[in-house]
Amino acid sequence: MRFIGGLLLIALIVIGAGIATGFIDLQKTQEGRLPEVQVKQGALPKYEASVAKVEVGSRNETVEVPTVDVKKP
């Protein structure tokens, strides 16, 4: 994986240097445009879902917490 990344990095450096020095000259020869798309009438699918009822609340609870004692040598 590292080898492929290294090759891609070297290729980008070579292409960048070629463009910067004029060795590679890029010129647009034709204007681009987006394709024409027609959207016709459609419908979304219908779903029914039965889900459980969730109740959120709080309560008081007593929890025993351990104590930590650090003794220096």
Image (cartoon, rainbow, N blue to C red):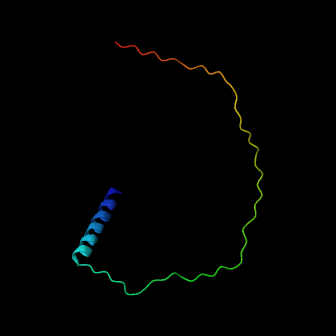
Task: Say which residue appears at 72% left-offset and 68% top-offset.
Answer: 44
User: Going by the image, does 16 lie left or right of 57?
Assistant: left
Task: Classify residue 65 by image quadrant.
Answer: top right
Looking at the rendered image, the quarter that the N terminus falls into is: bottom left
Q: Residue at x 69, y 80 (%)?
A: 40
Residue sitting nearer the eye, 26 or 11: 26
In the rendered image, residue 4, in percent from the top left (x then y), is placed at 33, 61
The reply, left or right, for residue 45 in relation to residue 17 is: right
Please state, as top left, top right, bottom left or bottom right, where the C terminus lies in the image. Answer: top left
Image quadrant assignment for residue 52: top right
Residue 37 placed where, x, y %? Answer: 59, 81
Give left or right: position of 50 versus 72. right
Q: Residue at 26% across / 79% down in the picture?
A: 24
- Report the front residue among 7 and 34: 34
Marker count (numbered): 0
Displayed quadrant of residue 26: bottom left
Q: Which residue is farthest bottom?
A: 30
Q: Position of residue 66 (x, y in %)?
A: 54, 19
Q: Residue at x 33, y 60 (%)?
A: 5
- Residue 41: horizontal and vertical position, in percent? 71, 78
Vertical relation: 53 (above or below) 30: above
